[in-house]
Image (tube, rainbow, N blue to C red):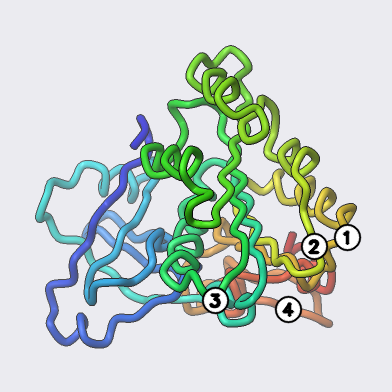
Amino acid sequence: MTSIEKLFYLRLVDSKAVEEFHYNPGQFLEISVPGVGEAPISVCNVQKTPGELQLCIRKVGRVTNAIHRLKEKDLLWLRGPYGNGFPMGVMENHNLLLIAGGLGIAPLRSVLQHALLHRDKYGLITVMYGVRCYSTMLFREEFLKLFREGDKLGVEFLLAYEDKSDAECYQLACERSDRCMSGLVTKLIEATPIKPDNTYAVICGPPVMYKFVVKELTQRHFTPAQIYMTMERRMKCGVGKCGHCITGSSNSIKYVCKDGPVFTYLDALKTRGLL
């Protein structure tokens, strides 16, 4: 997909596991390479075929480097799924505003696919995706099709790019200046008409992004309960044993692995250190 991210197609080989394995958008798995270690990875597609799933993995450490070196039909070990996932049932009969930065688009892709699979249950779907440049855009072919033809599906796909000298993104901006512009993803929020009354916002991206996106949304009159965010960067063991994911104080403690990784902004306001 890019120089540091690959899309992996996994198929379970245990027939009993195939029958029992079910996951929801926003949940994650513990992926392990024997002798190397394990890492929590969010699933990036909606479940359609039993026993099959997709993971978008960035090469950032020992485990993910080992996974990137694997060949077709090599074996990986996994446990899970873990976490609460996004409340797709709660968000039915509402518009969806998906806001992602960089690799954060991976778990939100499963939300988008779920909504498209059950299209009659959701209103307008708006996707705002912030990238550094064209070459870092994940799922490029898939999203460019939505950029150009998404209206047929009731999907508005908008792109923000940071590198003003990027020729490919500039061409997209010339093609649709209302849906592609230079700057941060918050610029898309500023430039796009949004009706918060009947809309849920879903956010995933680098930690620094949350603060500014939430600020823009609250200025647009989104309530804290209408804003969902996944804190997947805090995920660790998946079962709450290692304590790496604990946030909050004595009045409100959250285990991101068990209580999340999806929280509302209201949860974040009540739990110190969550955001």
Q: Quadrant of residue 145?
A: top left
Q: Which residue is mark 2?
A: 196
User: In percent of the image, x 59 and y 24: which residue is there?
Assistant: 173
Q: Which residue is mark 1?
A: 221
For the residue marked with disc 2, what is the amino acid?
Answer: Pro
Q: Residue furthest front?
A: 152
**Percent x, y of residue 222:** 83, 63
Mark linked to residue 209: none
Within 10 Å of disc 4 (Cα), the crowding (few <14, some 14-19, many 20+) is some
User: In percent of the image, x 77 and y 66: which residue is there?
Assistant: 265
Q: Earlier in the sequence, mark 1 or mark 4?
A: 1
**Percent x, y of residue 78:** 28, 69
Q: Secondary structure at mark 4?
A: strand
Q: Is residue 269 rendered to the left or right of residue 151?
A: right
Q: Which residue is mark 3?
A: 121
Mark 2 → mark 1, Cα distance in angstroms: 6 Å
Q: Secondary structure at mark 1?
A: loop
Q: Earlier in the sequence, mark 2 or mark 4?
A: 2
Quadrant in which the N terminus appears? top left
Mark 2 → mark 4, Cα distance in angstroms: 30 Å
Q: Earlier in the sequence, mark 3 or mark 1?
A: 3
Q: Is residue 252 above or below residue 34?
A: below
For the residue marked with disc 4, what is the amino acid?
Answer: Ile
Q: Nearer the viewer, mark 3 or mark 2?
A: 3
Marks 2/1 in contact by CB < 8 Å: the verdict is yes
For the residue marked with disc 3, what is the amino acid?
Answer: Lys
Q: Nearer the viewer, mark 2 or mark 4?
A: 2
Q: Secondary structure at mark 3?
A: helix
Q: Which residue is mark 4?
A: 253
Mark 3 → mark 4, Cα distance in angstroms: 34 Å
Q: Secondary structure at mark 2?
A: helix
